[in-house]
Image: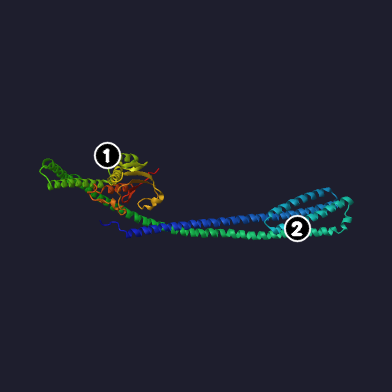
Amino acid sequence: MRNKFPNSGNSQLFESTNLSMNRIKFYSIISLFLIIVGSGISYWTSERIGYYTSALMETQDILQRTSELYASILERETNIRGFVITGEEAFLTNYRQSLIDAQMLLDKLKDLTTDNPKQQQNLEVLEDLIKQRVTVFEETISYYHEHGNLDGFLSSGRVENALSGYRTIKQVVTTINDEENRLFVERNRSLLNNINALPFIVGLISLFSISVGFVTLFSIFHYNKVQKIASRRIKNYQEQLQEQLYLLDDSNKELEQFAYVASHDLQEPLRKITAFSDLLVEQYSDTLKGDGELYLNRITVAANRMRRLITDLLEYSRAGRITSEEEKEIDLQDVIEIVLDDLEIAIVEKKAKVEVGTFPKVIGKETEFRQVFQNLISNALKFSDPKKIPEIKINCQEAPQEEIKRITLLEPELSYYKITVEDNGIGFDEEYSEKIFAIFQRLHGKNAFEGTGIGLSISKKIIEKSNGTIQAKSELGVGSVFTIYLPVIPS
């Protein structure tokens, strides 16, 4: 039959479709990557802006508290002078309060500058200077309380030391402020740089994303165009396929008509030949002697063999065809018991031992599976070794996954039952393990064993229609093993 489905145009179309889809995936990944990178950079920049903003606020806070600390020191100086001039205790009260305020401010500044070792060192120097200054003030207050004046205290040279200590405190405070002002300028510059860079980064990444988006959109349009062409071709192929199905249906009807003719018109002459042969035997058996009787027997045997061949051929043509019987869940245990019951006379005559294991349920047609096991078990009985008591073992287990993967006809992702029919018969050469499933294939002469050589072909056809497979292994003089793989019913 001529091929109506050209391959060259189809392969180019499918390659173009796959290429367009791959481009869409690639550009989508690039867009997603740019979005992620842009989001990451924007987030990082925003975090830096937040960091520098917080640092600037912290710097301003340090400058403010340093100013307050210096103001507290000045206030303490003023209160001491007021006390010395007037002798009023109110100035001492304010002086004590300024000491507390100054210490609190100093502690807070230490907390705010934990990340700046230089400022920590400056604050330690300042704290030591303040303590020295406080010591002088306390000595001044004590001397005043004892003598009522400061004449002797002033002449001791401690005033010059006090003035020198105050100037040093002022220098340290100035150093602290200069460092914070430097940090303020530096952090403010970094903040402005990040603020200015953020729109540029967002804009650049947006530009790249938009460009990739346009390319992706173009790829989608191209993909849709190719898809439309593919859809039209698929529709055309479906119409051609439907036409082929109609032709196939006509061929099946012709085959059915042939089967009808074979079952009636071809068998009718055979029945007449057999009938007249029987009449000759009954009415003229005394007359027919020697070669005449031999020839008549050969005619009868040939007619019976021809009738069996036609019957088996019809069975083979029907195997796997759609019939009124629906596929359903069937119990193989019941099927095998029925087959063994049908073969009971042959089993008894052969004195055979039959062992049957536990069998599951499978999907299929009961009549077809009965035919499969009927063929396999009857063959085991037929080809038994006359020197041995026939032993037939029929078992089932779930096939290992490694074994399933080695069999090309099975789906590796599915589970299968492994059914074995094993005998200790005459066996056959391993080279025929595939050939015995071919139609009309016989390994022995027609006079040695009865049969037409179609039974195993029918069994193979039924098993494969059930999405399984059948294999044979054998050894001359030892026996044979037929293995069937059938899909496990999904839970």
Amino acid at the residue labelled 1: Ile
Per the image, label 1 sits on a secondary structure element best described as: helix
Q: Nearer the viewer, residue 248 or 408?
A: 408
* Residue 437, percent from left and from top: 29, 50
First in residue order: circle 1 vs circle 2 = 2
Q: Nearer the viewer, residue 72 or 258?
A: 258
Mark 1–mark 2 distance (CA, rounded to whole Å): 118 Å
Per the image, label 2 sits on a secondary structure element best described as: helix
Q: Nearer the viewer, residue 295 or 89?
A: 295
Question: Is residue 190 visible to the viewer in this orientation of the structure?
Answer: yes
What residue is shown with label 1? 345
Q: Which quarter of the rendering shows the N terminus?
A: bottom left
Q: Quadrant of residue 154?
A: bottom right
Question: Is residue 331 visible to the viewer in this orientation of the structure?
Answer: no
**Residue 487 located left or right of residue 122:** left
What residue is shown with label 2? 125
**Residue 472 located left or right of residue 201:** left
* Residue 171, percent from left and from top: 75, 60
* Residue 147, percent from left and from top: 89, 52
